[in-house]
Amino acid sequence: MEKLIIESLKAVERAFDFDNDELAYLALTSKVERPIRDRWAFELYKNINPNFIVSREWLSTDLAILDNLVPRALIELKAMYSFNALNEKTILRYVDLMKKDTIKAKELALRTTSTPQIYTVLLATHPHASVGTKFKKVIKYSLGINKAFKDYENAENIKKTTNDKVNTHFSEWHCIANGSFVGGKAFEINTEVLFWLFKI
């Protein structure tokens, strides 16, 4: 099960042939957890044991893998932007939100007749450039994006610091996979989505 979960998440970008620049557009105009969750769910659905069911929003869980309606895996996703990790108060808020998700999943697991595996995924939209004036009211959180580029100079510095902050603040969590999805380009900005998959 764990191997399938890891491989299917990594396959999201290449398996679904996002239209050119589609993921960049979605990531820059909203939080991207739903599009990635939905593609991931279908990837699991295609490749999982036919006796299992892949369910979205099962009892308020983002994704669940069910065996005769008994959960074998519960998966929660949380999306932020890379600039969110640069602020200590903000990254701690995301840690807290993800802890609450895992508590909810554990409480749900206790109400079942199984012991499902519990996973949580942190996503971070990472633009490779600051937002130009004509797109400031179109791109979500353009002020935060531009402040990060002012403070950290370039996308590589922001990405490195984001990875360092996540590794520090989630050091007690068991990260079983991490990487990024290439999003393409939208509003003149190349964009990727970083991800970290934790097993609880």
Image (cartoon, rainbow, N blue to C red):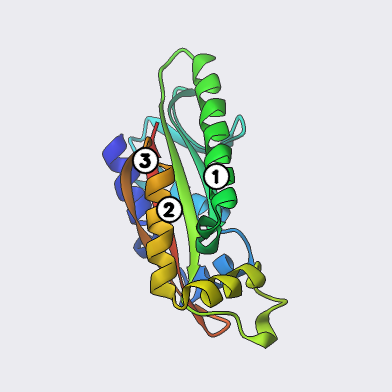
Which residue type carries mark 1?
Leu
Indicate left or right for 92 with 17 as reference: right
Relative depth, front residue between 157 and 10: 157
Mark 3 or 2 closer to N-term? 2
Secondary structure under the numbered disc 3 in the rendered image: loop
Note whether residue 42 is visible: no
Indicate whether 200 appears above or below 114.
below
Q: In this figure, which residue is indicated by the disc labeled 2?
A: 165
Q: Residue at x 40, y 31 (%)?
A: 200
Residue furthest out toward the left: 3
Mark 1 or 2 closer to N-term? 1
Determine the CA span between mark 3 and mark 2: 10 Å
Q: Residue at x 44, y 77 (%)?
A: 154
Q: Are marks 1 and 2 in contact (CB under 8 Å)?
A: no
Q: In this figure, which residue is indicated by the disc labeled 1?
A: 92
Residue 118 placed where, x, y %?
Answer: 42, 30
Residue 195 placed where, x, y %?
Answer: 41, 54
- Residue 171 is labelled as 3
Determine the CA span between mark 3 and mark 1: 13 Å
